[in-house]
Amino acid sequence: MIELNDEEKLQEARARCIESWAQNMNLYGITPSIGRLYGLLYFNEEPMTLDKMKEELGMSKTSMSTSVRQLQELKMVEKVWKKGIRKDLYESLDDWYQTFSYLFSVKWRKAAQLNISVIKKSLVELEELIENPNTSPTIKKTAIIDKEKMQYALEYYDWLNRFVDCIESKEIFNLIPKQTDTP
């Protein structure tokens, strides 16, 4: 068995975490390659240029630029300025609590609003079926059951929106405190 030196052990430990995080970032709609880029920036002690990121990850400069822009939009990476350096520099934003709050809120709020809109439209149609004297008793009975199920779904989406509000307002951290304030 080949013994790894200290630098190799460090790099292997980092690579293992980066790969695991990259694979799990799909929960937030982030591709593994973008997840690896975030991991690279997270472990790098200094801000990096697109050229350096490209060199480290073997991605094209265009792909790297697109990935960095996506991470900026997700509030996971920011552009920084350093005296004497003309190229754009980027570094990770390391507040994972804030990153989760933002990503979770955006995704779930959007999904909830879409579902609420669809349910409300469907409820109008069901109500028309229920109130129409020409609707068959079987269809009317099914429409009443479906209406109850959709009203239950609306109650759930109301709860989900209040949960998202709790995350966005940071009230969630009063209920479930952070372990630490620094990464």
Image: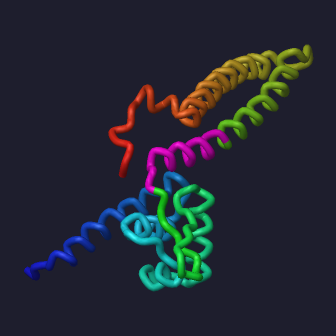
Q: Magenta span: helix, strand or loop, mainly?
A: helix
Where does the image place residue 60, in percent across and percent down from the top left?
Answer: 55, 84
Please say if 49 is above or below 39: below
Residue 36 falls left or right of residue 111: left
- Please tell me in which quadrant of the rendered image residue 161 appears: top right
* 137 is higher (above) or lower (below) than 34: above
Residue drawn at (50%, 57%), measured in percent from left and top?
26
Q: As rendered, which of 80 and 29 lies closer to the eye?
A: 80
Q: Count the numbered circles shown.
A: 0
The magenta-colored residue range is 94-109
- The image quadrant of residue 8 is bottom left
Residue 134 part of the magenta segment: no
The residue lying at 60 percent from left, 31 percent from top is 165
Q: Residue at x 10, y 79 (%)?
A: 3
Residue 102 located within the stretch drawn in magenta: yes
* Residue depicted at x 53% and y 81%: 84
Residue 117 is left or right of residue 173, and the answer is right
In the picture, the quarter occupied by the N terminus is bottom left
Horizontal and vertical percent for residue 150?
Answer: 69, 25
Q: Is residue 43 left or right of residue 104?
A: left
Which residue lies most toward the front here?
A: 83
Residue 90: percent from left, percent from top: 52, 70
Viewer-side residue, 107 vs 82: 82
